[in-house]
Image: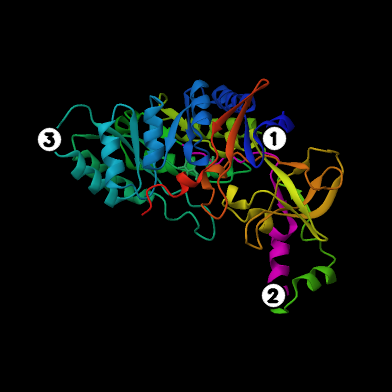
Amino acid sequence: MLLESARKFGTPQYLLDLDGLRERAIFFSHTMRHYIPNSEFFYAFKCNDLPLQVKTLKEEGFQADVAGIFELQLALKLGFERILFSGPGKSVEELKLALKKRKQVIVNIDNFDEIHRLKSLAGDRKSGRPLAVGFRLNAETSVDGAWSKFGFELEELKEAVRLVRQCPNLIWSGLHFHCSWNKTPKKYLENIKKIGTYLKENFPVEELRSLRFFDIGGGFYPEDQGIINKGEDKGMLLDILGIRRSSKLKIYEEMNFDPYAFSVTPVEPLENFGRAIASALQEYIFSFNPDIEIYFEPGRFIATHATTILLTVIAIKKNCAIVDAGINMLGDYKFSEYSFAPVVNITRPSTQMRRQVIYGSLCDPADCWGYSYYGEELQKGDTLAVLNQGAYTFCTAWRFIKPIPAYIAASGNRLTIARKAEKFQNRYAGCL
Ligand SMILES: Cc1ncc(COP(=O)(O)O)c(C=O)c1O
């Protein structure tokens, strides 16, 4: 199917396995519902907003989690019945649309200024049903404070609730946190405990009983993600030492360290997350509100494996191969710096891994797809498959030098164009 799609539509392309996507979505929702029956699933559009992908997930019972105006408009256009809107800097235009579509939309408020903006837009004369709002709570657990910009501190919650209560067109309906890149359930458990304990100590039970949802965000890390040695702690230290001594390569050699070898990041099975989160909810949340709905906002876990990027080798040099697309398809330098994804020569596949740098077609020395591949020795014209490229690639693709290629969708043995390749007129639309 991969080769057929490359033959039929050419390369480069993103290729979406729709059946695989459905399976993954069902696996996630069934696993979580098994442990937490009162769950709802909101797919994080930011992870991959290809309309066909989003529609397919809707068919599998997912609702929408959006973070910006286009995603919100897309969710409304596609008829999602429940749309969560979270983000740290919502514009007036976005908030107005949320208020207008209050039957479907729930806003997770991020900060006090947003409360004031929303209140002044909502007005203080009661008009129809109120807009349901939740508060995003800061779930910062990292030492470097990388996620500290998001949400309210727990101690600010009472004041936030008081301000929202003053507005007859807003109703406090839930709470939200999000923590990222979780290979174990640890951070979810810490946050549930912290928030549940605080709520019980600071709010009357009747008030907590009236809450509709507790939103525990996304951040479920998918399996099979690789990291190159260079991106591990030891590699980064050696890099710094190498720069100080002005030769990275020399220091790698001295330490007998292969910077481009990789390891696969271990991730606990999803069942462990479901079981552990259910038990924390039982203790800290259901004890005061047994009917509250638990919202999940998975992105990466659902989207990663279903998309493969297809490329063609267009030049072989002494020290590298060059393919027909650049990492503008990803919008990230991850493959040159820290991340590994399997690249397979699908023209002549094998399980043998070979070492060769595979560069892209951008005028940028860090435009690199990886340092190794599986298959017979690369030749000009070979088709390569870069696996597991469905999350934060197409939606983060750069407007840089080369066009953004087409997205093809496969289901059974049918192939269709889910999105056409970017054309000259798309790129320069609206320009003087
Ligand atoms: C609020 C929120 N929800 C959900 C997600 C999706 O996260 P992931 O793709 O890691 O599941 C993100 C990602 O940053 C987020 O910020």
Say if disc 2 is inside 8 Å of ligand 1.
no
Q: Are marks 1 and 3 in contact (CB under 8 Å)?
A: no
- Circle 2 residues within 10 Å: few <14, some 14–19, many ≥20: few
Q: How is the image coloured?
A: rainbow
**Which residue is label 2 attached to?**
243
Q: Picture quarter containing residue 7? A: top right
Q: Residue at x 66, y 63 (%)?
A: 365
**Which residue is label 1 attached to?**
6
**In this rendering, position of residue 327 left or right of residue 76:** right
Residue 311 placement (x, y as % from top left): 70, 43
Q: Which residues are magenta?
A: 216-242
Image mark for residue 125:
3
Quadrant housing the C terminus: bottom left
The image shows residue 197, relative to residue 57, as above or below, that is: below
- Tell me the SS state at disc 3: loop
Which callout, 3 or 2, points to the residue nearer the camera? 2
**In this rendering, position of residue 362 left or right of residue 385:** left
| Mark 3: amino acid | Arg
Disc 1 to disc 2, C-alpha distance: 41 Å
